[in-house]
Amino acid sequence: MTGLLEVDAVDAHYGDFQALYGLSVSLDEGETLAVIGANGAGKSTLLKTIAGLVRPTSGEIRFAGERIDGVSAHRRVTQGVALTPEGRRIFPSLTVEENLLVGSYGQRPGPWNLQSVYDLFPLVSDRRARMGGHLSGGEQQAAAIGRALMSNPRLLMLDEVSLGLAPVVVGEIYQALPQITGRGTTVLLVEQDLGHALAVADRVQCLLEGRTVLEGPVADISRQQVADAYFGL
Ligand code: ATP
């Protein structure tokens, strides 16, 4: 496997508040990394920093061998970086299909288009003409992932897929992940639902107050180690 993403000693601030402290993350092409941690650990900030929505105050980010920390967020999409944000951010007054088409802006060549997204998520296909604001939470989450896929990303970042959704819906969405990684997309997911995250990830990295407290292959780390790191024990 070759290195796709290299986050190197990144600090991030919101005004005077420091959210990330010299954080490093590396991700190989084709790998799935789960970033876990309690509320406020810095998980969303990490994803936003990689997507270009938060600017690091020090450190470097390299993607596919190129430095991207000075590149605009929309340019990063065209380079292959996509984020499904926490809260989904589906446009309520656009139809589901229009929401998906928004995601195809700056599309790279690849396997994802309206038809393949509909095949992946039949629940989105069934709602294609419905307004985004009239979807259930699970439908919105699936549509938001579909919208991110429409750019044909090399790296798909998912922020808290399971948040606020019924377990059965979370299960349906997680079932789609192997089909996404199976088409060559690298996945970085942030989760508080450890069960699902650890079931799909190759590696796990646990954050606490903006720093890494545990990382390694899922197969080599016990649930107890994860739980201890999560709670800062
Ligand atoms: P959560 O699961 O609650 O989203 P998280 O691990 O994703 O947690 P972040 O959202 O990255 O954590 O937040 C990290 C820290 O930065 C928190 O202390 C949070 O209060 C703070 N923070 C996040 N966004 C802002 C902001 N826009 N302005 C000020 N502080 C912020």
Image: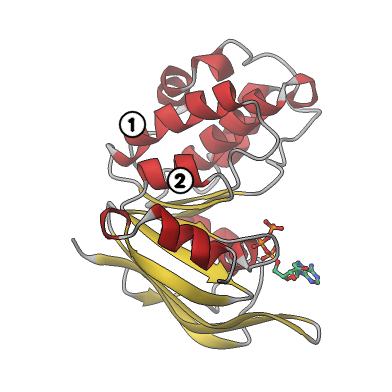
Please state, as top left, top right, bottom left or bottom right, where the N terminus lies in the image. bottom left
130 to the left or right of 81: right
Say if residue 50 shows up in the picture: no
The answer to whether residue 157 is left or right of residue 31 is right
Q: Nearer the viewer, residue 221 or 175?
A: 221
Which residue lies at the image location 71% right of the left edge and 15% below the top edge? 130
Residue with the mark numbered 2: 197
Q: Which mark is residue 179?
A: 1
Please name the residue shown 52% across and 58% down the image: 36
**Dot 2, how many residues are within 10 Å of its Cα: few (below 14), some (14-19), or many (20+)?**
many
Indicate left or right for 206 with 54 as reference: left
Identify which residue, 14 or 4, lies in the foreground.
14
Rendering quarter of residue 124: top right
Image location of residue 27, percent across then percent down:
34, 64
* Nearest to the observer: residue 151 or residue 53: 53
Label 1, secondary structure: give it: helix
Tell me the quarter of the picture where residue 57 sits. bottom right
Q: Residues at badges 1 and 2 in contact (C-beta under 8 Å)?
A: no
Q: Amino acid at mark 1?
A: Gln
> In the rendered structure, which disc, 1 or 2, sits on the residue that comes first in sequence?
1
Q: From the top left corner, tell me how far across and down residue 34 is, in percent.
A: 44, 54
* Rendering coords of residue 230 (x, y %): 55, 63
Q: In front of the other: label 1 or label 2?
A: 2
For the point 31% across and 74% down, the residue is: 65
